[in-house]
Image (spheres, rainbow, N blue to C red):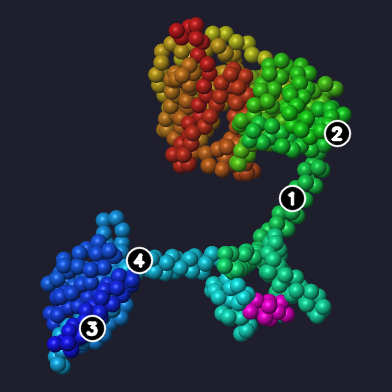
């Protein structure tokens, strides 16, 4: 009886010890039967998982949802282990709840009674923190592998404990650089092979400075390797005595900085030597930089030595005030507005006191801000003026005798000097036609000179647009018959009235109509359409000819521009007609434009303001 009591006491003691161990450990115990049903679960499982021990009894792992939590591949492998009655260790799976994921790790061994397999006994524990820590470590490692810099981590004893692939590749030719190597040994090996010097003393001094910087990190420094690579070295002391070293390859950056410095020097030199006044405006609307020629252009050289900040605040106002000395009041107002509030592309010419002529150009900059240039073109202006006066004088001197010659030839053709033989009549006719072409060229040149020097005077009156077009069509009927072309007028608005010079506008119509007919094919139709839009009267002349090539469309209204400028061209012309048309239309406050599709014809149209008092 006593022996039995002693055995029961021992058993009770063991149970008590086991219970105490269970309470002290972070694991719970479990037992399954031969069919993998849980028959035992230690009570501390509830503290760790929130699920009572009794809830597990009679359920298999599959009943508990572990199969879904593990995934089919891992589950199949686990079942193979159980089938072989083998022990398993650290079986890890995730329990996914509505708010979080809990990671569980379980280990177990088969147990037997009297040689007969009875099931498994084992333990389980929550390993969420360990898994999350491992995942974080993996992410950090992946990040360090992909940062593009050379990263290394040294322990409190200055031994290498981690290095990313870039670091290892940088030193792959040195077998001594590996995990566990001391920093001093590492740096000595590296520098002896990398320092761009053959002097042992210089190399040793460099090594010692590098070791001191590693132990007591300061500001980053650059290290130039023998192969020309430049590394920016940055050491950081971390908690626990660790040291992180980050080396960045700045070779390309330094090369770009050098190139940019050289370019900046070139720009600065050019900026100071270009014979134009230059003023750069920042995004805040204030001057950023300027050159010395700017002060010469506006005769304010005495301000050149003023403090930079004073000029930033007053330079635009000073220039605007200088513009106030021009003789054209309207021009002064427009220019002052452009200078003080620049916001778009602009180009103007103006005159300053002392008969100085200045060309202004302004352009917005892509990144914000504005750039202004001022060019003194007084000498060019005077030369152009002399040239224009010479051309005008010569043209006038030529026109008088040429008119006389054409008139005399006409009289001869008319029989004023007696009968003219037929062969002679042909020669005289050729002389008359070429004389008229030459006279037209002279008149065109004189017109252009007047337009370019604002000497173009208009004799304006109230004109009906339809009557103007009708008169022009009637005047060009003979020309249309010559080319076998039909003229068709489409009047979209009946009562459009403009203020204009009848003679000059007829000149525009004649030029546009003659061009349309010359470039049309026989039996083609040239359409003249009248319409009104947004307070403007539009006259559009459309042909069905070859159209204007795209490369000529932007310059078609410039002087001496001809689509076919060869000596063998079939259609005669001076290349001045459209330029004169543009000047005449502009003098009327209108604009002339072209719309053309190659091989499909062209439409030249001009727009003039409708008289408001008559149009209302």
The answer to whether 571 is drawn above or below residue 107 in the figure is above
Q: Which residue is mark 4?
A: 128
Q: Quadrant of the N terminus?
A: bottom left
**Cα gap from disc 2 to disc 3, whole angstroms:** 106 Å
Q: Secondary structure at mark 1?
A: helix
**Cα gap from disc 4 to disc 1, whole angstroms:** 58 Å
The answer to whether 580 is drawn above or below residue 260 in the figure is above
Q: Earlier in the sequence, mark 2 or mark 4?
A: 4
Q: Magenta residues?
A: 182-192
Residue 126 appears at what percent x and percent y? 32, 68
Q: Would residue 3 appear left or right of 332 to someone viewing this image?
A: left
Residue 424 in which image quadrant: top right
Seen as rendered, the residue at the extreme top is 613
Q: Which residue is mark 2?
A: 305
Q: Which residue is mark 3?
A: 10
**Cα gap from disc 1 to disc 3, whole angstroms:** 93 Å
For image coordinates 29% across by 73% down, the residue present is 20
Q: Earlier in the sequence, mark 4 or mark 1?
A: 4
For image coordinates 42% across by 69% down, the residue present is 134
Q: Are marks 2 and 3 in contact (CB under 8 Å)?
A: no
**Nearer to the camera, 214 or 581:** 214
Q: Mark 1 or mark 3, which is nearer to you?
A: 3
């Amino acid at each position: 009886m006593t022996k039995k009591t002693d055995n029961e006491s021992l058993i009770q003691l063991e149970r008590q010890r086991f219970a105490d161990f269970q309470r002290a450990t972070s694991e719970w115990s479990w037992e399954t039967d031969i069919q993998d049903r849980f028959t035992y679960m230690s009570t501390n499982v509830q503290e760790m998982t929130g699920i009572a021990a009794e809830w597990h009894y009679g359920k298999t792992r599959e009943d508990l949802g572990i199969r879904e939590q593990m995934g089919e591949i891992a589950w199949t492998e686990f079942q193979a282990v159980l089938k072989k009655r083998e022990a398993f260790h650290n079986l890890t799976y995730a329990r996914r709840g509505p708010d979080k994921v809990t990671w569980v790790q379980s280990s177990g061994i088969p147990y037997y009674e009297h040689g007969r397999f009875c099931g498994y006994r084992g333990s389980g524990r929550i390993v969420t923190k360990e898994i999350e820590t491992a995942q974080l470590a993996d992410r950090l490692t992946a990040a360090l592998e992909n940062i593009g810099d050379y990263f290394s981590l040294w322990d409190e004893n200055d031994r290498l404990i981690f290095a990313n692939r870039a670091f290892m590749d940088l030193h792959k030719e040195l077998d001594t650089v590996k995990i566990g190597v001391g920093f001093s040994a590492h740096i000595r090996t590296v520098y002896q092979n990398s320092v761009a010097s053959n002097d042992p003393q210089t190399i040793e001094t460099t090594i010692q400075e590098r070791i001191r910087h590693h132990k007591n990190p300061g500001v980053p420094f650059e290290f130039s390797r023998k192969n020309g690579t430049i590394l920016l070295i940055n050491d950081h002391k971390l908690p626990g005595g660790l040291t992180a070293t980050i080396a960045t390859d700045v070779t390309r950056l330094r090369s770009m900085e050098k190139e940019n410095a050289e370019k900046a020097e070139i720009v600065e030199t050019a900026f100071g030597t270009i014979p134009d006044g230059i003023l750069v405006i920042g995004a805040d609307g204030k001057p950023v930089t300027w050159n010395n020629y700017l002060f010469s252009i506006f005769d304010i050289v005495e301000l050149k030595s003023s403090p930079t900040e004073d000029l930033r605040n007053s330079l635009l106002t000073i220039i605007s005030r200088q513009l106030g000395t021009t003789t054209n009041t309207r021009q002064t107002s427009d220019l002052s507005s452009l200078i003080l509030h620049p916001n778009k592309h602009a180009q103007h010419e103006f005159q300053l006191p002392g008969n100085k002529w200045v060309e202004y150009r302004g352009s917005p900059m892509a990144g914000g801000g504005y750039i202004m240039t001022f060019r003194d073109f007084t000498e060019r202006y005077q030369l152009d003026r002399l040239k224009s006066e010479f051309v005008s004088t010569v043209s006038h001197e030529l026109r008088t005798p040429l008119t006389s010659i054409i008139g005399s030839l006409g009289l001869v053709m008319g029989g004023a000097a007696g009968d003219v033989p037929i062969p002679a009549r042909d020669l005289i006719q050729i002389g008359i036609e070429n004389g008229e072409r030459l006279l037209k060229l002279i008149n065109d040149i004189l017109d252009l000179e007047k337009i370019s020097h604002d000497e173009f005077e208009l004799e304006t009156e109230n004109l009906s647009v339809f009557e103007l077009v009708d008169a022009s069509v009637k005047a060009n009927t003979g020309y249309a018959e010559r080319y076998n072309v039909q003229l068709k007028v489409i009047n979209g608005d009946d009562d459009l009235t403009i203020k204009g010079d009848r003679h000059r506008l007829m000149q525009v119509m004649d030029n546009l109509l003659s061009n349309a007919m010359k470039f049309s094919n026989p039996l083609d139709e040239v359409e003249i359409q009248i319409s009104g839009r947004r307070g403007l009267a539009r006259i559009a002349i459309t042909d069905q000819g070859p159209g204007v090539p795209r490369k000529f469309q932007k310059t078609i209204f410039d002087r001496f521009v001809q689509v076919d400028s060869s000596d063998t061209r079939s259609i005669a012309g001076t290349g001045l007609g459209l330029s004169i048309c543009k000047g005449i239309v502009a003098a009327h406050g209108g604009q002339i434009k072209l719309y053309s599709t190659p091989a499909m014809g062209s439409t030249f149209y001009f727009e003039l303001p409708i008289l408001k008092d008559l149009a209302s």
